[in-house]
Amino acid sequence: MASLKFGTSGLRGLVTELVGLPAYSHVRAFCAMIGEDGAAGAGGEVLIGQDLRSSSPLIAAQCARAITDAGLVPVDCGAIPTPALALAAARMGAPAIMVTGSHIPDDRNGLKFYRGQGEIDKTDEARILAWHAKLALSVVPAEPASARAFDALAAYRARYVDFFGGEALQGLTVGVYQHSSVGRDVICDLLAALGANPVALGRADHFIPVDTEALRPEDEVLAREWAGEQRLDAIVSTDGDADRPLVADETGLFLRGDLVGVLTAAFLDADAIVTPVTSNSALERLGLFRQVVRTRVGSPYVIAGMAEAAAAGARLVVGFEANGGVLLGSDVDRDGHSLAALPTRDAMLPILATLALSASLRKPLGRLAAEQGFAVALSNRLQEVPQERTAALIARLDDEDPAYRDAVFASHGAVAARDGRDGLRLTLGDGSTIHFRASGNAPELRVYVEAPDPDAAMALLQEGLEFARTATSREAGNPQ
C-alpha cells in the first residue's frame, strides 16, 4: 500500500494497490469515523458514486461491502459526476464516497470522502488513517453486498435548470468534448435545457486521462480542428469525474481554470474569491472583488479559506483553482432564482455561468477572456518524478543555495522574491514567475509560469521543464 496517500483531493494510488483490502479497509475506517461522530445519514445510509474508468465498478462494489460490514447501508448512485454525488449527500445529510481517480491514468484510481456537510478536511483524513491503523483489517469478505439504487442526477440537473432558466444560452452552439467524462451526457442535457445547441464531439469507449491543468497536445489540436470545421461559440468538457471544467473559446483556444473561475465569480456578483497561490497574479489587480484570499493547492484548503472569508463578513464567496473547478461557498439569489451553496469542486456551474455571461453581454468568449488582462500563464508536468526528488530540488532553490538559485535564473534577472506556501513560486527579476511543486495525486512535478506574452511564457515553461528534468535526474544519480 506504499503508493496510497491523501493528496489534494482524496485518497489515490495504483489500482493494483487500491483494489481489495486497501479500498475495503479505508472505507471501513471512514465508516468508523462517521460512526464515532454520529454522522451517518438517515437509516445509516452512505452514498456511493463512480466514474467511468475500468476499475471503478469493482472498487465501488468493495465500498458497498465495507459499508455493510460497518453496520451501515450502502446506496448505489452509479456513474455520476462527483459534484452531483456531493449535492445528493448534502440534501440527504448523508456521507458519501466517490470512486474516482479524476484526471490521472487508468492504472490509478482513488476514493473521495464526503460528510453530509461536504468534503472531508485534512483533520478527517488524519482520523481515517488513524482508524485504518487501529482496525488493522486483514481479510476482505468475498460475498458481494446489496445496495439500493438511487437517481442522484435528477436533482443536479434541476439545480441548474431552475437557476439559469430555459433561455439563458439561447442561440449558442456549443461543442461538447465528451471523451470518457462521467458528466458527458449531463452536459449535453443541460445545455439543451438552457436553450443552447449542444454538439457531441470525441466520445470514447476507453478511459482518457484529460487533465485540465496539463492538457494533452492532441486535445488542444482537436479543439482547434473542431472550431475550424464548424461554427461553435465554445467547446466545453470536464476531467474524468466532472468536477473540473474545460472551456474553449470560439477559436478552440482553452481558457485557464482561474480565468473561468473569475468569469463565474463575476457572473454571480461575488465579493470574495478564494484561490490557490498557483492562480494568475492578475486577480488582485482586477479590482472586481473586495477580498482575494490565496491558499495552498487543494480543495480542502480552498474550502477552509472560504469559511474564513465568510466569517470575515463576505456576502458571496466563490472559490476556484487554476486547474479548474469552482466551489460555491454561499447561497445565491438572483432574479428570483436561488442556487444553494455547494462547497466542492463543480464543473457544471463554471461552464454554464461562463457561457451565460457571454450570451448576456453578447460578447464572444475570446473577447471576454482578453478583457480580464491576465498575464500569460502556462503549466505542464514531468511524470514519474518521485516526490522526494521534487522536494530536494525545491529545498536547494529555496533556502539551501541562493547562489545556485540566482545562477539558474540569471538570464531573467535572478530571483526577486519567493513564496513557499505550496512548493516554491519564484518571482524573477524581469517580472515573470516560475513555480515548482509536487503533485498531490501522482508522482509528478508541476511547473507553472507567467510572462508578458505567449512566446515568453512558452520559452520560460520549456526552460523550467528542462531544468527540472535535468535537476531531478541528477538527484537520482542519473546525469542524463
Image (cartoon, grey):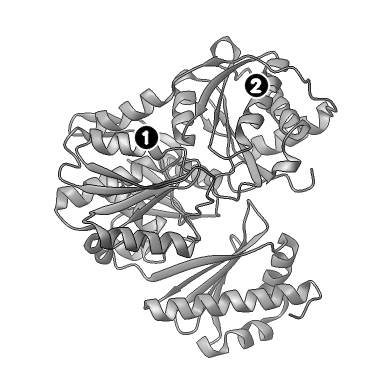
**Nearer to the camera, 45 or 228:** 228
Amino acid type of the residue that numbered disc 2 sits on in the rendered structure? Ala
Q: Return the residue at label 2.
A: 64
Q: Which mark is residue 186?
A: 1
Q: Is residue 191 above or below residue 227?
A: above
Amino acid type of the residue that numbered disc 1 sits on in the rendered structure? Val
Q: Is residue 113 above or below residue 43?
A: below
**Nearer to the camera, 302 or 478:** 478
- Quarter of image, res 455: bottom left
Q: Position of residue 203 (x, y in %)?
A: 42, 45
Quadrant where the N terminus is found in the figure: top right
Taking 199 as reference, is 153 left or right?
right
Q: CA distance from mark 1 to mark 2?
A: 25 Å
Q: Which mark is residue 385?
A: none
Question: How many tags in the picture?
Answer: 2
Q: Position of residue 319 (x, y in %)?
A: 42, 47
Q: Is residue 314 something one can see in this rendering?
A: no
Taking 31 as reference, is 344 left or right?
left
Q: Position of residue 259 (x, y in %)?
A: 35, 58
Q: Counting residues from the N terminus, which is met first, the one under dot 1 or under dot 2? A: 2
Circle 2 residues within 10 Å: few <14, some 14–19, many ≥20: many
Dot 1 falls on a residue whose secondary structure is helix
- Quarter of image, res 406: bottom right
Residue that appears at 47% across and 65% down: 217
**Nearer to the camera, 137 or 426:** 137
Residue that appears at 69% across and 62% down: 384
Taking 109 as reference, is 293 left or right?
left
Residue that appears at 43% across and 81% down: 456
Q: Position of residue 256 (x, y in %)?
A: 39, 59
Residue that appears at 62% across and 85% down: 408
